Image (spheres, rainbow, N blue to C red):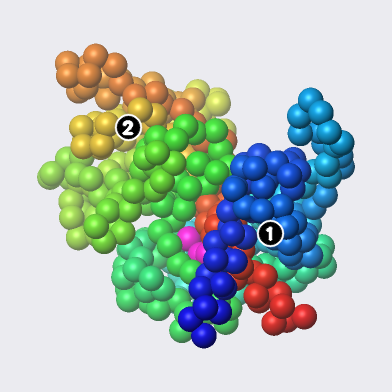
């Protein structure tokens, strides 16, 4: 029995090694894989055969490994069968996306809805409809969804949302209310992973996700920093003005009361981001002043983050992405006024190309990276369902 367990463990490890090298080096031949991994050619051929049968790998034609010898048949990662579902609940929308094993986005859905006016049961019921629609469409395209992750704008521990102030959620266990298996994570953390895997950020950066609330995710060496309890990144509740207005978190003068989406719209008497963008393009003073104030407040909060974490690059995402042309300079000026005495320069400030897609993409990408690291679990499920 012990020997069988050891053999299964070794097979799982070897499958992960082979698939990882195909992902990094593909197209690559079986002979080259044997040389790279140190496994025998027989073992590599068996592993590649299993991965091809599972739809994770496909042959891509002949490839010569060196100066001499006959060309071998190369294999590459395949996106034709295995996929993941990324979901997001935010204050004013629901979204879903399906991503295949090559990280190609196959499906995207978004639904505008005021989730503050709904109970968790209602919101999760609407989300389930969107999720099932995405899974059904993926199945029609020949994709099998290996797992799903849900992004929520709140403090999350496992499947329990401790608090999501902007949704009005407290101690909500998602698995009790959602009729599909799903992991749950913080929206800002997943947005940072989305930027890492689908965007253009370097391996070390701070991603700022601006919506109704404001969150941040710190990536160091290509890995998300979560903190001791997984609660790192609550940038929206960094105090900008100690005597400022009360915040939903229970504090006062928090950043999101000055730079969150509601604060921005309220400051210029507008009701939506498209309307704000039109006003900014038209040069309307009220809209320009609102972005000036929001950018300055964001720059102050980021100054504290820079002193603590010293990121080389700051990426602004969410609602800050379309607003970037108008908030960029106020943010930079606020940081420069407080940082150049010690640092001489401020971190690079860039805009996310993903915008509000970052969190659901990161949610799906988290599942895909787990499949790539441990393909045996997907192969086992496929065998059980055959």
Q: Residue at x 66, y 76 (%)?
A: 381
Q: Identify which residue is drawn at 41% across, 73% down.
A: 159
State the residue position of label 1. 43
Residue shown at the point (47%, 32%) measured from the top left: 202
Image depth: mark 2 or mark 1 in front:
1
Circle 2: element type: loop
User: In this picture, which residue range is highlighted in magenta?
Assistant: 147-151
Placement of 22 over or under 299, stated as above or below: below
**Mark sitting on residue 311:** 2
Residue 150 painted magenta: yes
Element assignment for label 1: helix
* Numbered badge on residue 349: none
Between residues 333 and 57, which one lies in front from this camera angle? 57
Tally of marks: 2
Q: Position of residue 343 (x, y in %)?
A: 22, 19
Residue 50, how many percent across, how many down? 74, 64
Q: Main secondary structure of the magenta part?
A: strand
Question: Between marks 2 and 1, how big is the CA–CA gap?
Answer: 43 Å
- Residue at horizontal 77 percent and vertical 80 percent from the top: 386
Judging depth in this view, the residue of 299 and 354 nearest the camera is 354
Q: Residues within 10 Å of mark 1 (few under 14, many from 20)?
A: some
Q: Is residue 195 left or right of residue 384?
A: left
The location of residue 356, given as percent across then percent down, is 54, 47
Q: Residue furthest left?
A: 243
């Amino acid at each position: 029995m012990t020997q069988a367990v050891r053999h299964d463990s070794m097979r799982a490890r070897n499958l992960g090694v082979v698939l990882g090298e195909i992902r990094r080096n593909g197209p690559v031949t079986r002979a080259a894989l044997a040389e790279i991994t140190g496994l025998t050619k027989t073992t590599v051929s068996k592993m590649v055969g299993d991965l091809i049968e599972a739809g994770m790998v496909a042959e891509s034609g002949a490839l010569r490994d060196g100066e001499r010898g006959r060309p071998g048949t190369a294999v590459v990662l395949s996106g034709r069968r295995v996929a993941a579902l990324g979901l997001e609940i935010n204050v004013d929308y629901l979204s879903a996306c399906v991503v295949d094993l090559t990280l190609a986005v196959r499906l995207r859905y978004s639904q505008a809805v005021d989730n503050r006016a709904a109970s968790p049961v209602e919101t999760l019921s609407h989300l389930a409809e969107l999720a099932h629609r995405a899974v059904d469409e993926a199945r029609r395209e020949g994709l099998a969804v290996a797992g799903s992750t849900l992004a929520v704008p709140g403090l999350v521990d496992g499947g329990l949302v401790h608090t999501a102030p902007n949704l009005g959620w407290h101690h909500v266990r998602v698995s009790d209310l959602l009729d599909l298996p799903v992991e749950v994570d913080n929206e800002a953390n997943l947005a940072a992973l989305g930027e890492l895997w689908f965007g253009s950020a370097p391996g070390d950066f701070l991603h700022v996700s601006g919506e109704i609330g404001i969150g941040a995710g710190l990536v160091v060496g290509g890995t998300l920093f979560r903190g001791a309890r997984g609660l790192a990144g609550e940038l929206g509740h960094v105090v900008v003005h100690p005597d400022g207005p009360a915040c939903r978190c229970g504090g006062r003068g928090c950043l999101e009361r000055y730079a969150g989406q509601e604060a921005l719209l309220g400051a210029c008497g507008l009701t939506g981001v498209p309307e704000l963008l039109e006003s900014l393009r038209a040069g309307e003073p009220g809209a320009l002043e609102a972005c000036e104030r929001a950018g300055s407040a964001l720059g102050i909060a980021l100054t504290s983050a820079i002193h603590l974490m010293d990121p080389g690059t700051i990426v602004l995402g969410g609602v800050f992405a379309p607003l970037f042309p108008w908030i960029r300079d106020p943010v930079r000026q606020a940081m420069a006024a407080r940082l150049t005495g010690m640092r001489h320069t401020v971190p690079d400030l860039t805009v996310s190309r993903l915008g509000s897609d970052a969190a659901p993409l990161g949610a799906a990408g988290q599942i895909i990276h787990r499949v790539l690291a441990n393909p045996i679990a997907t192969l086992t499920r496929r065998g059980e369902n055959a």
